[in-house]
Image (cartoon, rainbow, N blue to C red):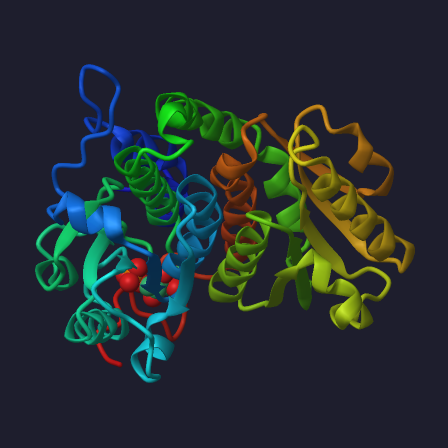
Amino acid sequence: EKGGFRSFMDKEIHDQPHAVADTLLGRTDAHGRLVLDEVRIDESVLRSVDKIIVIACGTAAYAGHVAKYAIEHWCRIPVEVELAHEFRYRDPVVNERTLVVAVSQSGETMDTLMAVRHAREQGAKVLAIVNTNGSTIPRESDAVLYTHAGPEIAVASTKAFLSQITAAYLLGLYLAQLRGNKYADEVTEILDELRAMPDKIQQVLDRADRVREIARWMADTQSVLFLGRHVGFPVAMEGALKLKELAYIHAEGFAAGELKHGPIALIEPGLPVFVVVPSPRGRDSLHSKVVSNIQEIRARGARTIVIAEEGDEAVRPYADEVFYVPQSPTLLAPLLAVVPLQVFACELATAKGLDVDQPRNLAKSVTVE
Ligand code: F6R
């Protein structure tokens, strides 16, 4: 069943090119326009949406955080991302013009389900992005956009995360197309770029040996930090979550810009810090800001492990290790940058002799609040 892999998680990490490709499959017509038949919410309602709230937990919420950057950019609709259990127990401002997007691999997470019910009671339309056919959350939502990652067996989410980002991007592009804004004309182009991602993910996987080697060396590590900016910020959070869950190592992710507002006090000689670096071909100030963050932490003795885009030589002088990923548009880069972090957590946990498929205290679907 594990297809020759040591664990389901290892297999699922390697399934990711397929998970993304399958999530993209069959969602355009002969003219290259997106057709999301499953999104059975009236087009007029979707045109009048003035706010999107993504509700989810854990890794699914980080997928929402990534999608926020893309959807706001393409659609100019404000997007909030909220943990389902927090959303449920406050008094959220929600009405008929709010589109609530519930993201869940299992479709059974009780916190998310309760938030879905709460949102619908307030008159919001709920669209579910879910991986498991016939599960409860899609049944209780107005519409569902399925991710086609295939069954995810390992407790820690990997391929579902990449497909959730992919599906949420499809939704963003669909809304842009429907609303005919300035990105409507670019939808086909962006879709082509998305379709190029599975091959690039494969390339990251093909070159992951060095990540595994570093992970094995670091089996005794007590604490690891993860930094990122823009879409790299939720990627850093997800990298930290994987390491906590699988390897039981204290890990923290934060926005690189926050460094000087507190976390830099944690930096001490030898502390491993992963830094997710945005493309130097994107908005230039973004890249150079992250490079100076690396410089700052390196100057304080941290061991810097950098995820950067191929060809980015500017990071080299300050990096103890660089893992290069193929070039891609900034918004799509999370689909690549998170992969070395998943491999790292999986390998480190394996090196510690832990059960990566069934980490202690965790359940695959959390059906209690
Ligand atoms: C992390 C992980 C959890 C889930 C979360 C939501 O690896 O697996 O954080 O992402 O419990 O689960 P779903 O997506 O099933 O609602």
The C terminus: image quadrant: bottom left
Q: How many marks?
A: 0
| Drawn side of residue 211 relative to residue 14, left or right | right
> In this picture, is 199 found above or below 295?
above
The outermost residue toward the top is 30
Residue at screen point 46% across, 30% down: 201
Q: Quadrant of residue 254?
A: bottom right
The N terminus: image quadrant: top left
Q: Position of residue 352 (x, y in %)?
A: 55, 60
Q: Position of residue 220 (x, y in %)?
A: 67, 62
Q: Nearer the viewer, residue 75 or 155?
A: 75
> In this picture, is 220 found above or below 209?
below
- Residue 131 visible in image: no
| Drawn side of residue 195 relative to residue 146, left or right | right
- Residue 271 visible in image: yes
Residue at screen point 8% across, 60% down: 139
Residue at screen point 40% across, 36% down: 14
Q: Position of residue 108 (x, y in %)?
A: 19, 65
Q: Quadrant of ligand 1?
A: bottom left
Q: Position of residue 225 (x, y in %)?
A: 67, 61
Q: Nearer the viewer, residue 247 or 79?
A: 79
Q: Quadrant of residue 278?
A: top right
| Drawn side of residue 212 relative to residue 284, left or right | left
